[in-house]
Image: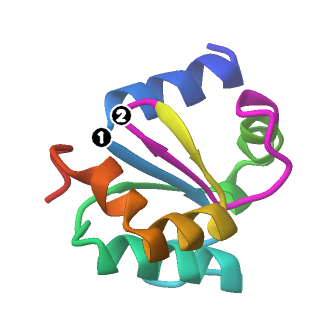
């Protein structure tokens, strides 16, 4: 299975997916830590997290998959939402909460 197929399977098979550096319990960069905090502030206690530091193929592949150069990357219902800055802006405007509404997140 190609890395693109693996990524597609992950983002379509889970309601909320965060590709990040580290884990939600031990983020390995400030942007990933912020992304986790934003999800928790939105009431998302259960989401799939992929530590890109454990798989260099996924780390490179996820950037190509979404055509987005940075990590973390958030996917909701199979759709790319954005990175940390976009998540922060969407959270502050209330748009992220609306995006997550109705998604089985707990």
**What residue sits right under mark 1 in the picture?**
15
Q: Dot 1: what SS?
A: loop
57 displayed left or right of 52: right
Q: State the image quarter where residue 64 is shown.
A: top right
Residue sitting nearer the eye, 58 or 89: 89
- Compared to residue 6, the image places residue 20 above or below, namely below
Please give left or right for residue 83 compared with residue 103 in the image: right
104 or 53, nearer to the observer = 104
Could you tell me which quadrant the N terminus lies in?
Answer: top right
Q: Residue at x 40, y 58 (%)?
A: 95
Work out how far the residue at label 1 is from the one at label 2, CA to CA, in angstroms.
Answer: 5 Å
Q: Could you say which quadrant of the image residue 6 lies in?
A: top right
Percent position of residue 20, x then y? 61, 62
- Residue 31, image x, y percentages: 68, 78
Tell me the residue at 44%/48% (across/down): 17
- Residue at image point 40% right, 59% down: 96
What residue range appears in magenta?
64-78
Q: Residues within 10 Å of mark 2 (few under 14, many from 20)?
A: some
Spot occupied by residue 61 in the image (x, y as percentages of width and height): 77, 34
Q: Nearer the viewer, residue 13 or 2?
A: 13
Q: Position of residue 85 (x, y in %)?
A: 68, 69
Badge 1 density bin: few <14, some 14–19, many ≥20, Cα 10 Å:
some
Q: Are marks 1 and 2 in contact (CB under 8 Å)?
A: yes
Regarding residue 24, the answer to whether it shows in the image is no
Residue 48: in magenta span: no
Q: Residue furthest front?
A: 93
The image quadrant where one finds the C terminus is bottom left
Using the image as rendered, state which of residue 48 and residue 79 is in the foreground: 79
Residue located beneath label 2 in the image? 77
């Amino acid at each position: 299975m190609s890395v693109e197929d693996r990524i597609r399977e992950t983002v379509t098979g889970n309601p909320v997916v965060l590709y990040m550096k580290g884990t939600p319990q031990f983020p390995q960069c400030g942007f990933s830590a912020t992304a986790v905090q934003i999800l928790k502030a939105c009431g998302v206690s259960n989401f799939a997290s992929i530590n890109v530091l454990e798989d260099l193929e996924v780390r490179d592949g996820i950037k190509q998959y979404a055509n987005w150069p940075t990590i973390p990357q958030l996917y909701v219902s199979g759709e790319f939402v954005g990175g940390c800055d976009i998540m922060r802006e969407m959270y502050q405007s209330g748009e992220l909460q609306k995006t997550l509404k109705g998604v089985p997140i707990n």
